[in-house]
Amino acid sequence: MREDAGNGCYDGGRSREDMFGECHAHIFMDGVNYREAVQRHLHGVDDRVIRRHFKMYREKGITFVRDGGDDLGVSERAREIAGEYGIDYRTPIFAIHRKGCYGGIVGKAYENMKEYAELIREVKAHKGDFIKIMTTGIMDFDTDGGITGEALPYAEVKEMVHIAHEEGFAVMCHTNGAGPVADLVRAGADSVEHGNYVSEETLLMMAESDIVWVPTITVVANMFGCGRFSDELLHEIYELGKKNIRRALELGVHMALGSDAGAYLVPHGQGLLDEWRCFQECAEDEDVLKARIFEGEEKIRKKFRFF
Ligand SMILES: [Zn+2]
């Protein structure tokens, strides 16, 4: 414990002045234009992009970054130079999705469990810090905010988590929807990313489990007024998201901050502060909120690393 325990000591010995870690980022994307971001690394990783983004984290005092992966080798390269910026950086190397389902923008596909297991071995060969899987689509902002595509069946998710755990990896899951998130809890997954549209029942299950929820809600707020999507729909989704975060905090769900930095209109560094502002709207006592977030983040720091 630190000496100033009386005026603000949190889990892991962190004080209220300490900065949060960014628990969900994509170092290869720039928050502006996905296609152009990919182009920059197509003929080899462009270190300048990584360095620019790490500088943005440094400027905000952020020293922990967990990446969501990419299929261009960018996050793998980023891990090699993160130390120069004093950043503890974790990467799944690439994310894994079922062929034909959502996930091509950040990773590699499998068609059966044999291929999935091969991808896990590939992550291991590259010393990935954890496994990232995609079990559902994304929010469809173009229409009604529903979730695109179909969720993977429970049996498949369970098998995927099991195989990854057997190999010693924690599992980060890109998942939306009450049923699919409940499936993750049942499967013993370690973190749920986004997790839009969770229900009371699912939140109760999450609260009783060890799973950490990283809502990345600022992705929605940062698009207000951008003109690409309906503001009415965005505000509706945002309010619902905050309601769920509020309830999750009440119930004791483990939570951590991640902004999906690199996604459209979410800058590296600033994105985490944006996510924090959204969370501030979801709790009365800021000190208690900070302690809760540090607690969830600590779980991530401990589990999501290559052993
Ligand atoms: Zn992401």
Image (cartoon, grey):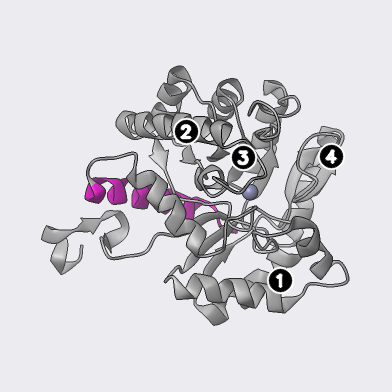
Is 296 included in the stretch rendered in magenta?
Answer: yes
Q: Amino acid at mark 4?
A: Tyr
**Rendered location of residue 15, percent (x, y):** 25, 62
Q: Which mark is residue 110?
A: 4
Q: Amino acid at mark 3?
A: Cys
For discs 2 and 3, the disc positioned in front in the rendered view:
2
User: Where residue 270 appears, x then y in whole percent?
Assistant: 49, 63
Q: Are marks 2 and 3 in contact (CB under 8 Å)?
A: no
Whether tag 1 and tag 2 are in contact, CB under 8 A, the answer is: no
- Label 2 to label 3: alpha-carbon separation: 18 Å
Residue located at (18% from left, 58% from top): 8
- Residue underneath mark 2: 241
* Pointer 4 local density, CA inside 10 Å: few below 14, some 14–19, many at least 20: some
Alpha-carbon span between mark 3 and mark 1: 22 Å
Task: Identify residue for label 3.
Answer: 173
Q: Which residue is mark 1?
A: 77
Q: Is residue 5 magenta?
A: no
Split into 4 quadrants, where in the image is the C terminus? bottom right
Residue 249: quarter of image: top left
Left or right: 19 in relation to 47: left
Q: Rounded to the nearest whole Å, what is the CA distance between mark 3 and mark 4?
A: 16 Å
Amino acid type, mark 2: Gly
Q: Residues within 10 Å of mark 1 (few under 14, many from 20)?
A: some
